[in-house]
Structure formats: C-alpha cells, structure tokens
Amino acid sequence: MPVQLTGVSYRYGRFPALRGIDLLIPEGSLTVLCGVTGSGKSTLLRLLSGLEQPDAGRIDYTSGGSCASVSIVFQQPESQLFAGSVRKDVEYGLEQRAVPAPRRSEAADRAMRQAGLDPERYGPRSPFLLSGGEKRRVCIAGAIAPRPRLLLLDEPTAGLDPPAVRALLETAAELKRGGYTIVVATHDLDCFFPLADQVAVLAQGSLRYSGPPDGLWTGARVLEDAGLEPPAYIRIGRMLMRQGGLDALPAGAGDLLAKLDPLRLAYPGGGACPGAGGERPAAASRSLSAAGAAAAAGGRAAGSGRPATADPAAANSIADAANTTAAVAAGAGAIAAPAESAAYGSAGRPSGSALRALDPRVKWLAMALWSLVILGMTSALPLGAASVLVAVLLACGGITQKRAVWFYRPFLPMFLLLWLLSAFSWSGGASFAFSPAGALTGGLSVLRLGLLISLGFLFTETTSGAPLREGLEWAIKPLGRLGVRTRNWSLAVSVTLQFIPWILGKISALQLALASRGNRKRGLARWTPQQISLMAVPLLLQVIGMGDELSTAIEARGYDPSKPRTPWLVLSWRQRDTAALLLVLLAAALLWGLSRS
Ligand SMILES: Nc1ncnc2c1ncn2[C@@H]1O[C@H](COP(=O)(O)OP(=O)(O)OP(=O)(O)O)[C@@H](O)[C@H]1O
C-alpha cells in the first residue's frame, strides 16, 4: 500500500518531535528510516500505524488502504506479547479483525512459517519463555498474520545475536519478495541498506533525505550531517576506491567481500594474507594499505563472498560480514553520558525548571511535611487549597499536560470505585442507597489520596535517581544511630519510587501494543476487567524480570550496606534552597492553620 505523508508534524507537549515531513512510501518497497537516537523514527512509525495522529499535515493511505491495514512491531518484543501460547498470540490480531476460527489457524500457521517459526514446535509454547530473537519473530508473525498492507518494524535487530540477525534479514527479504510494503526504523545501516529501495534520513525531527541508498554516496554528506556514519562496507569501499583497489562502491557487505576475493592483499609487514592464496604479491599487483588489508582479511574470514542484493540468499552473508566490517571500520564512538549526568548542568545541578534545580533535601522535607498536613485534613477548604498548591507546582515543574494525563489515568478507575463504595450503601438484595454524607467523606478521602500520590509524582518527576537517593539518605541518617540500616531503606525507597513511573510506562506500552493488534479501545473501555486480565501476566512477568535484574545489578556492583560509600553526588545547600525551605514551612503552616480553623 503506498502511503503519502504531507507536511506531517507532531509534538510531545511543547516538544516538537517531527516537523513538516513530506515522504512517499511506494507500494512493495522497503524503506529504511534512519537517524540518531531521538531523531523521531519511532514517532513517525506510530503516526504511520495510526496509533497517534499528526498535529499538522496528512497521512494518505492510497489505493483504498487505511491505518487499519498497517501492522507494527515495536522495539521491545516483550511489550507486545500477551497470550498464553505463541499460536494464540499470533491469532490475536486476526480475532480482533473478526476472522473466522478455521481461517485464523491457517493464517497463523502461514505467518509463523513466514517469520521463520515452525508452527508445530513453537505454536504451543509460552511466548514469555522464548529467547529475544524468537520473541521478535513471534511479534513479526503476529504482525503479518492479518496480511497488513504496510508493515512497520522498529529497531528489529536491536539486542539480537548474529544468527538471529541473519534470520531476521532473511525474513525481511522474504516478506519484501512477497510484496509487502515495509518501513524499518533502524540504526543498523550495514544490515538494512542492502535491502532498501528507499532511505529516509531524519535529524531532529526533520527529513534530511529521501531516495535510493545510492543517492547518499554521491554529493552532500547527508548521513554524516545527520550524525550517522555510512555503513562499514561503504567506508571500506571508499577507502579501497581511493587506493585503486575498487572501481565502484559495493552494494553491500557481501558484495564487498566478493569484490575483495580476487584481490591479493598485502600484509602490513610484507607477505600475503593467507586467505588470498598465500603467495607474495607481485610488484605489479594492487597493494592495499595496512588498514585496508586488515579490513579485507577480517571480512574474508567472516563472509561467504556472495554479492549482497535484496535476494534472501544474499541476506545470509550480510549480517556476518557487516559485523566484521563494522568492527574494523568503526571509529571511536562517543560514549553516551549517563542519563543522570546529562540532566545536570555544568555546575552539577539539574537544568530545567526551578523545581528540578532545588536541593533534594528540600523536596524530601516538603513531601514529608505536606503529606502529614494533608493526612490531617478533613474538610473541603484546606484540601482545596492543597490541591491548588499541588496543581501550581505540577505546572511549575515543567510537567506537560499529556504526561500528567498519562500518569493519572490508571488511578482514575480506582478513585471512582473508592468513591462509589463510600457513596452507596447496600443492605442486601437490590437495595442500594445513596448517602450524601458518605459521598462527601469518600470524595474527601479520595482527594486526600490523590494529593499524596500527586506529591510523589511531582517529586519523582522533578528529581532524578541519585539526588533522590542522596536526599533521602541524608534525611534518615540520624536513624542509623538507632541501628536502622539507612542505606538499605534509602535504596529501597528510591527504587520503589522510580518503579512506579516505570510500571505506568509498561502499562502504556502494553495498551499501545494491544491497539496495534486491532484492539483499539478508548477511554474507560481500556480498563475493563477483560483488558486488565490481558495485560496482567505480561506486566507481572516484566515486573519480576525487572526486580530480578535490579537485584543482580546491585549484587554485581558489590553492594554491601555495612561499607561506607562514595556518594555519586555531593549535595550542596544554596541560598535558594533556604528560601524554598522557608516557603515550604510557610505553606505547611498555612495549610495546617486552615485545616484547624
Ligand atoms: N512520550 C514522550 N513524551 C515526551 N517526549 C517524547 C516521548 N516519546 C518520545 N519523545 C521525544 O521525542 C523525540 C523523538 O523520539 P523517538 O522515540 O521518535 O526517537 P527515535 O528516533 O525513535 O529514537 P531511538 O533511536 O532512540 O528509538 C525524542 O527527543 C524523545 O525524547
């Protein structure tokens, strides 16, 4: 299905993620969407899948198609699996599209085979107990089972080992041959460029290039300007062309290996590369530089020597060869700074809003004090005043409306249920009675609970992990004299606090995945018991997995609560922190006074 994007823009709150994208995705083509991290690839895929709507511009699914004929495979396959068996999971999208049962099973078998899974062997297995590569194949099978007219793959090779990458490339080449229109968002240019009909390069949400891959090697340095490096086979090919070793750029890593095969490669210290026949090169034979020889020798060891084309057989050689050539040609990459340090300015203080810049001790004290005051409130006026205070702080904390809605939405059904339980009394049979007093008391209790949750949300949104932990450790340090293991407690609390947004993020991802499989429920319909039961098992498994990984990571880093620790961050108290503390105390006193009047 051809798709035309015209002037497509999208914002997350105030942050522009995509700006004015014009792109045609031709029918039956494989388009590679590339760009550095955060350039907008996943966002563009979500818009193409119809899971999000553009803020401006249009997406036209021509030839009678619609976003209902689009399937997407997300970056993390574990966020996309729900059912108790692989077969049921693959059939899920078909069920949502009301495909009759006998045809469902047939289509699921076909999709599993196309994705490289034997239906007999994998069909009855639990999708949660498969390897990463197998899970991704199940996701692909689930995505292609309804025969989508456009298939979107987000970072399909991320986290896969070379054999799994090879298998995935074969699947992609096979699907392309089967006439699927495919868009792949990837950093793995070595693997996917040889399969691509079209490349779209994104940088900071703008489209910098769209056209055939070959167009990138002539003229402007589009990839480099977008912060990317050309695939290793192109870099090696360019080097060999400069040295007279090649006449034209290779079409892929396999093609490069095939072109290198007849060349006699000189060792840096003289002599010939063993793979090149073991003879000393003749004076007249082409001699390559040390780097070229090393690259070629490495490539020869790994590859099959077949030319790389969109042919699935050739895909085999791409992954192996790409791995070797990438290792040879990769320059020293920039090492990403840890997320926490990135959030800090040069003075070691968080950048962004004033709340983020405050010392975490002020925030801990504010949260503890205000929580106590709020717990003591029993009437509407002080609770109303506290709500205004929290709302103003949420707005000042730079938390977008969208983010706040995302956070509060899962709590709303629980609040509603609690309120209804206190507002209605049941005296057997069908006799329900509405109690205005119960409704008021219940409403105030729910509001109190909401405010306490909001304080936690405000705190964790405006404080990253290390300051949060250091601040808490400082606050509870005096308890250490009583024999309390304060380090354990501060670690446990900060991990728990950071776990809540993580769990909410996972719930959002699962709901998005359900929507991508045709289960496009909106509003409260997303929270029915049936929906919740679908998400319960995968969510639980992810939480257990995360807990397991955390404890292993803590152990692996030699955590010993009895040993002194070098703090990651040295807290420093400033004048503005004193001023903020005074305001916190003043607000607490006013609220307390209001609740007692
Ligand atoms: N839910 C969100 N709320 C706010 N900003 C977001 C959200 N999701 C993504 N962004 C921002 O939008 C920009 C584009 O994100 P996107 O995930 O599309 O990038 P990407 O190119 O797919 O990155 P990667 O290669 O790391 O997956 C990034 O700057 C990101 O921080």
Image: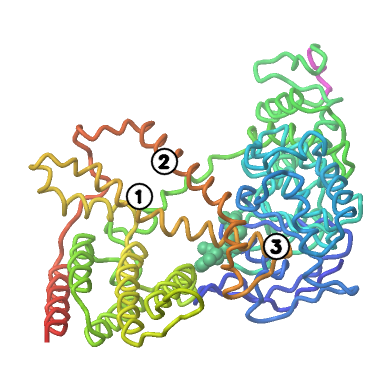
For ligand 1, tell me if the residue under mark 1 lies within 8 Å: no
Q: Secondary structure at mark 2?
A: helix
The amino acid beneath tag 3 is Ser
Give the magenta range. Answer: 280-285
Give whichever of discs 1 and 3 has the lower sequence position.
Answer: 1
> How far apart are the alpha carbons under marks 1 and 3?
31 Å
Q: Above or below — where is 83 with respect to 247?
A: below
The N terminus, quarter of image: bottom right
| Mark 1 burial class by Cα count in 10 Å: few <14, some 14-19, many 20+ | some
The amino acid beneath tag 1 is Val
Residue placed under numbered mark 2 in the picture: 550
Residue situated in front as seen by the camera: 400 or 20: 400
Give whichever of discs 2 and 3 has the lower sequence position.
Answer: 3
Residue 252 percent coordinates (x, y): 80, 41
Q: Does the residue at mark 2 contact the one at mark 1 (Cβ under 8 Å)?
A: yes
Residue placed under numbered mark 3 in the picture: 516
